[in-house]
């Protein structure tokens, strides 16, 4: 990275609003896109802070830097991507995989952000029961029994049958 | 029931369905195809920033991150109403 100043003049920026402070930022080649933007009180966000994209906090500090555009490696292409590895994410991924098999789809990807945060299995099983395909927990109960989680497995089975009854009547 | 049993069961369930799992990945944003359609989900791991494309994206982030990035309407709780993850 070339940190030599591209020119000696400094650009002047204004902060809007009640402060109206001006200050200078030296223009370096590598820093050419440092911008200071006024806060739009009516919209409660900074101009250029795309409301549609909703990235980050709309009430950001007044300085921002523009990240250079870059090529990002493609991790993969999938039929279904599930963001989140909690009970809902597991249920969604499994349900998608099961539905996908029926529709000759390929794979689902499951991102874990909080794997092992320990909400406990019951919630996971209940979430699995409530998936729209209805039959997700059958696998879960069977998987818990051999590893000594009998109570939860029984609970899961109860919840599963309850869920299936609900599905029959409710849908 | 221990959380360890839960993890084993969860991993087993997902492995049995041949689901690719990416642990310790944080959703970082989306690249939109147009106003309504998501082109790619940007994720960040220890390997850096990567993109994942799919026909269907399911938001199970717990915070509605993906939906919010994609432009879906949302409300955020405040101190009075409910606890929420600080932004």
Image: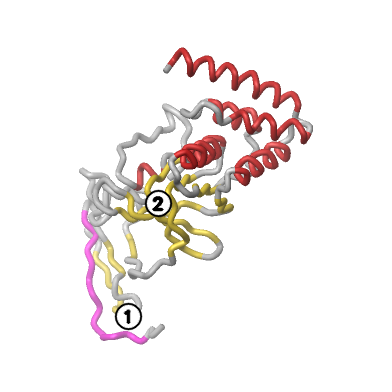
Assess disc 2: are there few (<14), some (14-19) or many (≥20) residues with their C-alpha within 10 Å of its C-alpha.
Answer: some
Q: Mark 1 sits on what residue?
A: A28
Camera-side residue: A44 or A154? A154
Residue at point 46% right, 51% down?
Answer: B27
On screen, residue B79 above or below A35: above
Q: Mark 2 sits on what residue?
A: B54
Dominant secondary-structure state across the stretch colored magenta = strand
| Residue B85 visible in the picture | no
**Labels 1, 2: front one:** 2
On screen, residue A107 above or below A96: below
Camera-side residue: A112 or B57? B57
Q: Which chain letter goes with mark 2?
A: B
Q: Quadrant of the N terminus of chain B?
A: top right
Would residue A91 appear left or right of B29 to someone viewing this image?
A: right
Q: CA distance from mark 1 to mark 2?
A: 40 Å
Would residue A18 appear left or right of A1 to someone viewing this image?
A: left
**Could you tell me if the residues under marks 1 and 2 are in contact, i.e. CB atoms within 8 Å?**
no
How many numbered circles does the render carry? 2
Q: Which residues are magenta?
A: A4-16
Query: How far from the left and from the top, in percent, is residue B19?
Result: 55, 48
Point out which mark residue A93 bears: none
């Amino acid at each position: 990275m070339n940190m030599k100043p591209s020119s000696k003049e400094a650009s002047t920026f204004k902060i809007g609003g009640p402060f109206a402070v001006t200050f200078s930022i030296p223009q370096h080649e590598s820093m050419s896109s440092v911008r200071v933007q006024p806060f739009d009180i009516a919209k409660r966000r900074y101009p250029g802070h795309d409301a549609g994209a909703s990235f980050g906090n709309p009430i950001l500090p007044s300085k921002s830097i523009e990240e250079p555009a870059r090529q990002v490696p493609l991790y993969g292409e999938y039929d279904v991507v599930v963001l989140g590895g909690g009970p809902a994410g597991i249920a969604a991924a499994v349900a998608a995989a099961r539905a996908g098999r029926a529709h000759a789809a390929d794979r689902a990807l499951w991102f874990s952000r909080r794997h092992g945060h320990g909400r406990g299995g019951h919630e996971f099983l209940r979430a699995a029961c409530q998936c729209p395909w209805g039959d997700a927990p059958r696998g879960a109960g069977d998987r818990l029994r051999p590893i000594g989680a009998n109570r939860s497995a029984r609970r899961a089975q109860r919840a599963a049958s309850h869920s299936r009854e609900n599905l029959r009547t409710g849908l | 029931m221990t959380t360890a049993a839960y993890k084993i069961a969860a991993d087993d369930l997902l492995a049995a369905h041949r689901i690719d799992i990416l642990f310790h990945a944080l959703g970082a944003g989306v690249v939109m195809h147009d106003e309504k359609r998501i082109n790619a989900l940007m994720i960040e791991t220890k390997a850096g920033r990567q993109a994942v494309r799919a026909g269907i994206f399911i938001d199970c982030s717990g915070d509605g991150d993906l939906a919010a990035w994609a432009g879906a309407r949302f409300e955020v709780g405040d101190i009075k109403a409910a606890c929420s993850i600080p932004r």
